Image (cartoon, rainbow, N blue to C red):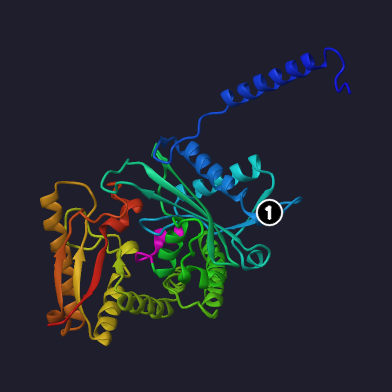
Amino acid sequence: MTLFKPGSARALLSLALCCVALLMAACASKPPASSPDTELPFDEAAAAATDSLVAQTQKLPAFLTKLSGKRGLVLDPMLDAASGQQTAATRLLEQRVTERMTAKYESFEILPFRASNLSKTPYLLTGTMTRVAPEKPKSPLRLDLALTDLKTGNVVAQASSLAKDEGLDTTPTPYFRDSPILVKDKVIDGYIATSAGKPGAPADATYIERIGAAAVINDATNLYNAEKYQDALGQYRSALATPAGEQVRVFNGIYLTNVKLGNMVEAEKAFGRVVAMGIAANQLGVKFLFNPGGTEFWSDSKVSGAYGMWLRQIAREGTAAKVCMTIVGHTSHTGSAPVNDALSLKRATFIKQKLATEAAELGAKTKADGKGFRENIVGSATDDAVDALDRRVEFKIVPCG
């Protein structure tokens, strides 16, 4: 039986060769996949991490069975992993990831981080950026993206890339810029750990258990950033009323909004709760700013006007908790190491003396230490809002006796 007409074999061979040529041309035009260890311009690094994350989802049964329509992903705003802050740079990362996903991969829809959206889809997108060498201001940044299935509590996809810092704006958003403390608790630590988690591994339990409250906190923080302080205060109080609402971010938000609204009695109560939670967690870093090179508080009362109240609450809560503390001073990365070591110790000693004035028994229960710039979090050496956390004073709980 004749299967092909004369000459048909030759035609099929020509067609096959043509297909091979087209395939080779397509492969040649496609840029080679970059290694996660290759430093790329920021936009390219964000695209590489996004592409890798999406490629992993194409192997998941839940995504393969989606034959039509869009797959919704809820985006929990991305963070700087070292500080736990949202910055202009983390917002840029969100923007680039969102643009890449929605433009190149039409099956995805990025949903805002709201409680109502969490009920629409179980898929949660998180991301962080981390400076590889904090002691070097322009060292590359590692970008981490993760996709978590809230139904199973597992990370289902994770991707990383290295981005060059080519003048990125790391200024904190207003909430973090105005915060008197290092806002980094177990929930934020859990977010960071989840973003770097391995596919198939459980996401951080503390972070996932509080995801509903986190969505309400995010709404409140967006209102604060938009200078809608009364609305923000109401939303922070709503977050506080949720089962997992007693978080540092919530009381810090209540403090900030009350300060903006001039309600200083309520602000002081909220700051006291922030301090108490920080002491309990042994994680309290306060942004006391000093005059350049000195041990006196910043001269502008708009900045330092609340410092007396902060000290009063730290003394009150430290006394109530009956703890001993090491007061650790830090400086930004400007000037020589010996000068900064001495300066940070002098500033810590100044705070120790102030606390003893508020509560005499703390004089024997506190000691001063200085770290200079050896434990910088930001490391930009800009001496402005960007690296305010590098000039913090920490209160670390230590055994008494």
Labels in figure, total: 1
For residue 242, which quarter of the picture? Answer: bottom right
Q: Residue furthest front?
A: 1
Q: Is residue 10 left or right of residue 248?
A: right
* Residue 172 sits above or below residue 315 on the image: above
Which one is nearer the viewer's eye here, 152 or 72? 152
Which one is nearer the viewer's eye here, 205 or 57? 57
**Residues shaded magenta:** 174-184
Which one is nearer the viewer's eye here, 16 or 169? 16
* Amino acid on which the number 1 mark rests in the picture: Arg
Residue 136 % position (x, y): 27, 43
Residue 357 drawn in magenta: no
Residue 15 % position (x, y): 75, 19
User: Which quarter shows the N terminus?
Assistant: top right
Which one is nearer the viewer's eye here, 305 or 377? 377
Q: Residue at x 58, y 24 (%)?
A: 29
Q: Is residue 35 left or right of residue 21?
A: left
* Residue 200 sits above or below residue 401 on the image: above
For residue 313, which quarter of the picture? Answer: bottom left
Q: Residue at x 26, y 75 (%)?
A: 311
For residue 4, which quarter of the picture? Answer: top right
Q: Secondary structure at mark 1?
A: strand
Q: Residues within 10 Å of mark 1 (few under 14, many from 20)?
A: some
Q: Which residue is mark 1?
A: 71
Q: Is residue 231 left or right of residue 388?
A: right
User: Which quarter shows the C terminus?
Assistant: bottom left
* Residue 168 sits above or below residue 295 on the image: above
Residue 298 % position (x, y): 25, 60
